Amino acid sequence: MQLPFLKKSPNTSTREYFFALEIDHGLIKSAVWSVINDKPQVLAVSSNQSWDDKSEDSLITAADAALSDATSHLDPTGKVNIHKVIFGLPADWVGADKISSTQLHHLKALSEKLDLQPMGFVVPPEAATKYLQFTEGVPPTTILIGFWPHILEITLVRLGKIDGTQLVHKSAHLADDVVEGLSRFSDIDMLPSRMLLYDSGIDLEEIKQLLLAHPWQAPTKHLPFLHFPKVEILPSDFTIRAIALSGGSEVAQATGLINSASETAVEQETVSEPAHSAADLGFVKDVDIITQSPPPPP
């Protein structure tokens, strides 16, 4: 008897799993992902782990806790061993598509200590932009604002392209901090009337209301908003999922885990133009990024 509608369950013991590790200023989180039905899928997400944003030991301790937490959600028995990882790195850790020498040293130590094999890296605003483009079906035009313990990360996106990211030290006046970041985009004639907030585990609803009450179009602000901006809150796991799914797609294609032809067809249906090629994101087939030379000093 043939049972065409009953498919054999995949053997999870032979499935390859990967980590996504997002390192932000003061916080670290991770996810476990795998390729299922020719697409990367997130299977588990960790809780946020704090680190001091300075020391190597603090980075390694927090990363270990995040990776262990994500793995425990996938497999409470502890039988699954995962080694390959995609890094999500702060914008100021990367220059000319390469990791700065100091941070490269930290990542090498982290990888050796935790027995990780780096597959590539991506900057979270870039991954978020591509993921937005995939989920919404059109190139996004928006202001992405990340709220970390001591830093605001403000990214201007127009038609799916990033015009730049500004890091602003966080003060007690968050609306003024956002104004400061937006003011640095001095060559922009019109700002998008949409703000998307992503978080560090804090309550973003209060911040949303604060931003909605701010007089963005007041003449004294000198900010080129054509319309009063709409403010939305992204899910708390949005950036780590974006890193895993958009970055994971690049890795899976580069390593042959996804059929390039089928993946291209899917992207053509949902995304008018990819945000980056694999090389743009630092994904290089069969090359460990930690062994690569850092960019020369300016």
Image (cartoon, grey):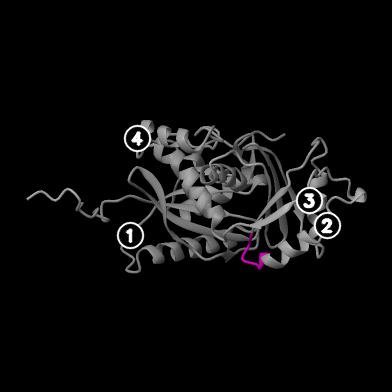
Q: Nearer the viewer, mark 1 or mark 2?
A: 2
Q: Amino acid at mark 4?
A: Asn
Position of residue 64 measured from the top left corner of the image (x, y, whole percent): 49, 62
Q: Amino acid at mark 3?
A: Phe
Q: How far separated are the C-alphas under marks 2 and 4?
A: 47 Å
Residues at marks 3 and 4 touching, judged by CB atoms closer than 8 Å: no
Which portion, as a residue range, is magenta? Answer: 199-204
Q: How far separated are the C-alphas under marks 1 and 4?
A: 25 Å
Q: Which residue is mark 3?
A: 228
Of helix, strand and loop, which mostly describes the magenta segment? Answer: loop
Q: Amino acid at mark 2?
A: Asp
Position of residue 197 measured from the top left corner of the image (x, y, whole percent): 66, 56
Q: Which residue is mark 4?
A: 259
Q: Is residue 114 visible?
A: no
Residues at marks 2 and 4 touching, judged by CB atoms closer than 8 Å: no
Q: How far separated are the C-alphas under marks 3 and 1?
A: 49 Å
